[in-house]
Structure formats: structure tokens, C-alpha cells
Image: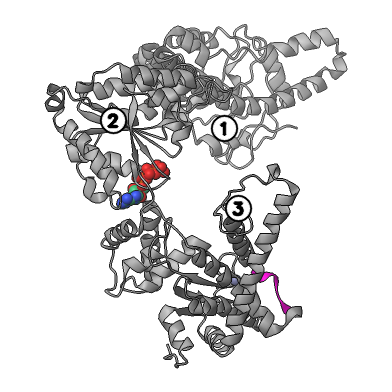
């Protein structure tokens, strides 16, 4: 026996064969389902197959509708729910089979009583009066209808109700093609069994078994279909919304995928930023650039004044310099000083895969700017839009973009008050057409700051944090040759972070030195456990460098020596030039070579030739580089004379070996000098190495104390 319901609450079980029979011949069979207490116990309920009456009587006693004839019900329902009865294949017999509260359906959807369902349906709204009276009659009798797969009345009602409700809602807002799309007809699931029985010619004896199997499969499939249909409906809705969005996008712009980027990209470009807060005050260490840009500021403040005199100002200014030197900041400062709008665009924004998109962005940008003149348009990374690579396969439409830019720049008069500032790290890469007069015809170099500039930048950013009085920005500036403004800002920031992590109240020299080393050489590797032997070798190696630097007249002053591993190094000695060196003398170069040699020589003298390590390789690289340049580029070798030898490939073998010979001599002599110094100052060398082993890091003053033979104060 097959039970439709789970087992706990009042339930009626119907034999499956009856279900199937009823399924097929609803007109001949009336299954009266009785839910009275006595019958609840019955596991099997026999249908009254041979009810004599021509009109079968539906036993609706339980529903409070005793002796209501089917015909009457039909008429009533036909009145209330027009079309409901059309599908006669499905009878209402199932609807009274009900199940426990723990049923699958109820667990999933909660109790659903048919009459509240009817009440909420739009049909009820259409025929409220009659239906309401029925509902109120029946209200006291909750009928929970299980829905596990068969076409129960409830499941039909539910479908009817939800469909009609959706239809009613949809009618107001959705066009019919949408409705068709969203609410596609489900079709009938039942026809196939009849057909199947006929076509398969199944013998009578097996027909029941076949039907049972069919019904079981049907039940399972129904549950699955329900789920699938739900998700299908959801998917269709999403697809529909996407489709609508797509159509909207297409109407606006044929390049759908670009449209969104265009709006976001361009809006940011087209939205001007008023740069009141950024002025030349904020840009340090680039005095020449500021002076050159000062006249542009004057022009922006009063364009008429300039053009009245017939003066011609450049339309485009090219800021050229390495990354992070403050080009963007300067451009903002120009707008800020003149108090005009600032339009920012990055060249890479215009670099588009699609035809015309880059060009149209440029058009929009200029249109917007012209409407708001006087103003500044800043195009960062100009080389990525105005580079020489014309129509490479990677950038098929770059030529168009450049042409648009050129056309826009040619298209307005100087007195319109629009100044275009472009920035690039590689001016050589720019398209020649861009740097012709009338376009980007003024170049302003923004170099890396010199010692004075770096000091100013450091002071500027130090003033934004708490720092100790003992901090000397100039010392840090001297040790940061080649740092850009952005890197110096980062240095100060890192020092502040370090102080915070260490629980200090102020930033001291120690943190600044620390972050300088971190930026130069990578983070400290405190976790690395270095054995004593290696530590000792490192200490002697580093103090070897330090001793040579200390006792060689033309060497740079020592800043610090440490045996703390950092990045790839086990220790290092840092030297500070007193000033940025624009030129170096032969003596200075030789001194640098000697200092480099000091490390290896120290190892050799202290531990013997058999124990020298690989740790000196970069020292040798350094010394060899200097020697090579002295010979081949600086004309500092007597034998080879004042001549440069640039490309070794074109040199004759004799010249090549002569060059090598000279380099070798320079290195050998340097090595001997270093050896001599270290032998002479063996005692100092030992003291310094021991101090390093004790303290790990020594600054310039401490090194001097040790080398003068004094005792270091215990820290
Ligand atoms: N000369 C400077 N004075 C003060 N701050 C500076 C200076 N140079 C750089 N900075 C700081 O570094 C930041 C980055 O600099 P900016 O973006 O202006 O450099 P850039 O030259 O435009 O770099 P890129 O070429 O990478 O675009 C600035 O916002 C500023 O905080
Ligand atoms: Zn070394």
C-alpha cells in the first residue's frame, strides 16, 4: 500500500489504484473521502464504485455542505471561478486528503488553507459576495491540503491563485509579450499515461502495476518539477531585467560594455575638482618648476589681460619627471593658486579597445572644460594616450584618440582660458605631433629633489607628525640621495608607524633611520637566527669597510654600521655624502673602491684565506664597476688615455684585453691599499668588530668613540 501522507495527524489514506482510476475516469468514479473519526483509523478506504445515481454524490458532510450535488457544486464553482471546471481530467476528489503538520509541504510552506487562498485570489475579488458566504460557512473547518506531487485541488488552486494574482499584477505594468515570457504555460502532465497505455499495448493483468509505477514516477517528478519551476521562474525574471537594462544601454550607446565605464570614467574626469586647498606652498623642493608655472597661474587668473597685449601663452604644458616627484601635485597647485576648476584625466583612461570611445571621452572632457573656462585640464600619463605606438594591434584606435586630442587642442583659442597640463615620465615616447608649437609646447622639468629639496620635503611632512627636537632632517636628507617626494613622504610615514608600534610618543632619528633602511634595503629580519660564527664574520667584514672609510681621506663619512640582517644582507655600513655629488674625483672613486675591498680583506686577514666567504660578491661588483667606468668612460687610465669605450662588441681583441688589464691593475692596487690600512689598524678593527657584536648597530658618533679607543657608554 502506498500512503500519500505522513503518519501523525488525522489522515485519510487512499489506495493508489483508486487514485489512478480516479485520475483517468473521473466521471465514473466518485471517491468519497470521509474524515470522520471512525474512518481515520482505516488504513484502506474502499470507494463506492457502483453508486447507482446518474449524478454521483460527493460526500461533503465534513465540509458542512451535506448532500450538495455535484452539478450544483459545478454550477456554483463555474459562477465563482469561470473556467475552473474546463479541465475535467482533474477532479476535486483529492483535495480532502490531508496530512499532518509535519508533512513535507507544510514544513516547506506552512499551512495553507484553501479558503484563505480563494479569498486572496483575484477571482474572489471579482465575485466577492458568493464566495465570501461559502468561505465564511466553511471557515470553521480548516482543510489542510497536502501537496506532494499529485494534482491535488490545492496545488491547482495554489497555481491558479498565484497565476491569477500575478496576472492581475502583471496586467497593469507588463506588456503581453513579457507576460508570455514570464508566465509560460505549463501544459498538461497527464495526457501521456493514456497514450502510453494505448501505444504500448499493455496486457490487462499488468495494467495496474504499470499505473502504479507511473504514479510513483509522476509523484517524484512533480516534486522535482515544482522546484525546477520555481528556480526557472526566478531565472527568467533576472534574464528579463538584464535584457531591459541591455536595451536601455543599447539605446544610449552602441558600445554597451563601454557605456558603463564611459560614464564612470568620464564623470570623474568631467567633474572638476576645485583645488583651493592645494597651492605652491604644498609643493617643496621644485622651485624652478614653480617659477615657470607662476606665469600660467597669472594667465588663468586673468586671461584677457594677457591676450590684450598680444602675448601668446602656451596651450599645453608638459611636466616631465620621474614618478612621485610631484607632477600631479604641481598641476593641482596651478589650479589652486588661480582658483579655477581642475579636470583630472589619466591617459590610460582613453586607451580603449573600441573604436571611437577614447576619442569621444576626449571630446566630452574638452567640451565640459571649455564651458567652465578658465580652468586646468590635467592629463596624467600622457604617454599612454599620446605615445608613438601608432595603431599597434594592442591599441587599434590610439591614433584616433591622439588625433582627437590634437584637434581639440587646435580647436580653441588661447584666450579661452583653458590650460592643458600633461605629465609624463618618458617625454621621448611622445608622438611628435603632440609637442609641436601650439600644443604641448612648454616643457617643465620636475626632477628628483636635491639635498635642500629633500630637507624641505622632510621638514614639511615631519611637521604633520610629532617628532623629537633631536631629529635633524638634513642628516636623513643626505642619506636619501635619489628619493622622490613621494618616497620621502613614505619614509616619514613609516617612521611614524614604527614609533607607534614601539609605543613611543614621538618620532626620533632612530625611527627615521630605520624606515630609511627599510625602504632602501627591505625589512629587518629579526627572526633570522644567525649563528655566532657567521655573526663574528659579519662583524669583522663590516668593521673592515668602516675602518677603511674612516682612515681614507677621500672616502665619504660613515653614517652607521650594523650587523642586523636586512633584506638580503647580513649587515652593512652606510656612508653619507656631505652633499649631493654632481662630480666625483679620481681620488673619491678610488676611495670608494678601497672601502668596498675592506670587507673581503678583513675576512682574509682575520680568518685566513681558506675561510673567506661568498659575502663579498656585491662588494666586488661595486669595485669592479667603478674601475671599469674609470677606464672606459672617464678616461682615468693612463694607458688607455682619454677615450671612451662604450660598446665592447665593437672593440678589437687587443683593446679589450688592454681594458681588462687596466681594470685588474686598479682592483689589485685597491686591494693592497685596503690590506695595508687594515693591517695598520688591526687593533681598532678588532675593537670595532667586538663593539658591533655587542651592540649590533653603531652610529657615526659611536664608531668614532670606539676607534678613538674610548669606552662606549652602556646603552
Ligand atoms: N615636491 C613635493 N613636495 C611635497 N610633496 C610631494 C612632492 N612630490 C611628491 N610629493 C608627495 O607624493 C605624492 C605623489 O606625488 P605626485 O602624484 O604628485 O607625483 P607624480 O610626479 O605625479 O607621480 P606619477 O608620475 O607617478 O604620477 C604627492 O601627493 C605628495 O604627497
Ligand atoms: Zn661588504
Foreground residue, 281 or 611?
611
Quadrant in the rendering for residue 335: top left
Q: Which residues are magenta?
A: 611-616
Q: Is residue 289 left or right of residue 205?
A: left
Q: Mark 3, mark 1: which one is toward the viewer?
A: 3
| Residue bearing the label numbered 2 | 271
**SS class, disc 1:** loop
- Residue 36: assigned label: 1
Instruction: Give coordinates of residue 471: x percent, y percent.
Output: 31, 71
**SS class, disc 3:** helix
> Where does ligand 2 appear, by image quarter?
bottom right
Instruction: Give coordinates of residue 343: x percent, y percent.
Output: 29, 31
**SS class, disc 2:** loop
613 magenta-colored = yes
Q: Quadrant of the C terminus?
A: bottom left
Foreground residue, 188 or 177?
177
Q: Earlier in the sequence, mark 2 or mark 3?
A: 2
687 magenta-colored = no
Q: Earlier in the sequence, mark 2 or mark 1?
A: 1
Instruction: Give coordinates of residue 147: x percent, y percent.
Output: 59, 29
Mark 2 to mark 1 CA distance (whole Å): 77 Å
| Residue bearing the label numbered 3 | 632
Q: Is residue 61 left or right of residue 126?
A: right
Whether the residues at callouts 2 and 1 have beta carbons within 8 Å, the answer is no
Q: How packed is label 1: few (under 14 Cα within 10 Å), some, or many (20 or more)? A: few
- Relative to 187, does residue 463 appear above or below in the rendering? below
Q: Mark 2, mark 3: which one is toward the viewer?
A: 3
Q: Residue at x 28, y 26 (%)?
A: 315
Amino acid at each position: 500500500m502506498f500512503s500519500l501522507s505522513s503518519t501523525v495527524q488525522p489522515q485519510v489514506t487512499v489506495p493508489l489504484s483508486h487514485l489512478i482510476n480516479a485520475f483517468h475516469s473521473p466521471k465514473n468514479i466518485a471517491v468519497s473521502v470521509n474524515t470522520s473519526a471512525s474512518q481515520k483509523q482505516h488504513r484502506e478506504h474502499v470507494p463506492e464504485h457502483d453508486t447507482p445515481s446518474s449524478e454521483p454524490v460527493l460526500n461533503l458532510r465534513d465540509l458542512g455542505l451535506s448532500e450538495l450535488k455535484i452539478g450544483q457544486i459545478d454550477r456554483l464553482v463555474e459562477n465563482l471561478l469561470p473556467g475552473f471546471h474546463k479541465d475535467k481530467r482533474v477532479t476535486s476528489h483529492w483535495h480532502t486528503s490531508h496530512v499532518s503538520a509535519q508533512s513535507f509541504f507544510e514544513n516547506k510552506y506552512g499551512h495553507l488553507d484553501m479558503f484563505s487562498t480563494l479569498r486572496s485570489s483575484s477571482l474572489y475579488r471579482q465575485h466577492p459576495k458568493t464566495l465570501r458566504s461559502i468561505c465564511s460557512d466553511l471557515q470553521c473547518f480548516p482543510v489542510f491540503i497536502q501537496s506532494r506531487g499529485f494534482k491535488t485541488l490545492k496545488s491547482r488552486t495554489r497555481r491558479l491563485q498565484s497565476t491569477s494574482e500575478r496576472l492581475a499584477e502583471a496586467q497593469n505594468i507588463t506588456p503581453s509579450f513579457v507576460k508570455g515570457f514570464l508566465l509560460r504555460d505549463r501544459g498538461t502532465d497527464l495526457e501521456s499515461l493514456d497514450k502510453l497505455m494505448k501505444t504500448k499495448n499493455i496486457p490487462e493483468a499488468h495494467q495496474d502495476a504499470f499505473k502504479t509505477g507511473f504514479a510513483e514516477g509522476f509523484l517524484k517528478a512533480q516534486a522535482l518539477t515544482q522546484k525546477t519551476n520555481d528556480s526557472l521562474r526566478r531565472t527568467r525574471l533576472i534574464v528579463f531585467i538584464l535584457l531591459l537594462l541591455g536595451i536601455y544601454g543599447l539605446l544610449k550607446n552602441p558600445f554597451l560594455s563601454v557605456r558603463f565605464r564611459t560614464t564612470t570614467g568620464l564623470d570623474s574626469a568631467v567633474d572638476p575638482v576645485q583645488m583651493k586647498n592645494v597651492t605652491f606652498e604644498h609643493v617643496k623642493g621644485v622651485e624652478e618648476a614653480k617659477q615657470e608655472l607662476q606665469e600660467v597661474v597669472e594667465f588663468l587668473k586673468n586671461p584677457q589681460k594677457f591676450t590684450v597685449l598680444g602675448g601668446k601663452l602656451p596651450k599645453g604644458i608638459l611636466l616631465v619627471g620621474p614618478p612621485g616627484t610631484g607632477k600631479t601635485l604641481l598641476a593641482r597647485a596651478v589650479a589652486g593658486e588661480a582658483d579655477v576648476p581642475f579636470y583630472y584625466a589619466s591617459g590610460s583612461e582613453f586607451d580603449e579597445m573600441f573604436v571611437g570611445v577614447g576619442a569621444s571621452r576626449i571630446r566630452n572632457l574638452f567640451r565640459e572644460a571649455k564651458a567652465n573656462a578658465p580652468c586646468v585640464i590635467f592629463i596624467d600619463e600622457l604617454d599612454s594616450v599620446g605615445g608613438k605606438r601608432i595603431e599597434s594591434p594592442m591599441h587599434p584606435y590610439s591614433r584616433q584618440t591622439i588625433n582627437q586630442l590634437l584637434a581639440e587642442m587646435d580647436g580653441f583659442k588661447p584666450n579661452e582660458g583653458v590650460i592643458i597640463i600633461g605629465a609624463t615620465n618618458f617625454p621621448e615616447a611622445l608622438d611628435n605631433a603632440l609637442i609641436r608649437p601650439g600644443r604641448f609646447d612648454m616643457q617643465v622639468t620636475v626632477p628628483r629633489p636635491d639635498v635642500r629639496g629633500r630637507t624641505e620635503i622632510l621638514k614639511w611632512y615631519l611637521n604633520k607628525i610629532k617628532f623629537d627636537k633631536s631629529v635633524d632632517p638634513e642628516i636623513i636628507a643626505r642619506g636619501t640621495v635619489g628619493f622622490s617626494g613621494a618616497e620621502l613622504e613614505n619614509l616619514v610615514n613609516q617612521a611614524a608607524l614604527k614609533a607607534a608600534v614601539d609605543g613611543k610618543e614621538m618620532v626620533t632619528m632612530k625611527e627615521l633611520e630605520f624606515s630609511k633602511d627599510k625602504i632602501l634595503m627591505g625589512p629587518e629580519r629579526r627572526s633570522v637566527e644567525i649563528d655566532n660564527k657567521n655573526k663574528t664574520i659579519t662583524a669583522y667584514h663590516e668593521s673592515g669597510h668602516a675602518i677603511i672609510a674612516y682612515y681614507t681621506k677621500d672616502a665619504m663619512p660613515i653614517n652607521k654600521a650594523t650587523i642586523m640582517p636586512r633584506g638580503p644582507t647580513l649587515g652593512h655600513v652606510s656612508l653619507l655624502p656631505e652633499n649631493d655629488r654632481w662630480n666625483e674625483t679620481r681620488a673619491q672613486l678610488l676611495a670608494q673602491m678601497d672601502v668596498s675591498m675592506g670587507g673581503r680583506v678583513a675576512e682574509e686577514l682575520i680568518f685566513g684565506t681558506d675561510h673567506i666567504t661568498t659575502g663579498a660578491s656585491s662588494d666586488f661588483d661595486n669595485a669592479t664597476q667603478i674601475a671599469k667606468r674609470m677606464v672606459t668612460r672617464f678616461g682615468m687610465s693612463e694607458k688607455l688615455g682619454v677615450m671612451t669605450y662604450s660598446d665592447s662588441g665593437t672593440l678589437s681583441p687587443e683593446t679589450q684585453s688592454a681594458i681588462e688589464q687596466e681594470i685588474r691593475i686598479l682592483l689589485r692596487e685597491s686591494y693592497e691599499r685596503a690590506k695595508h690600512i687594515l693591517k695598520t689598524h688591526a687593533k681598532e678593527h678588532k675593537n670595532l668588530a667586538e663593539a658591533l657584536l655587542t651592540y649590533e648597530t653603531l652610529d657615526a658618533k659611536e664608531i668614532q668613540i670606539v676607534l678613538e679607543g674610548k669606552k662606549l657608554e652602556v646603552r
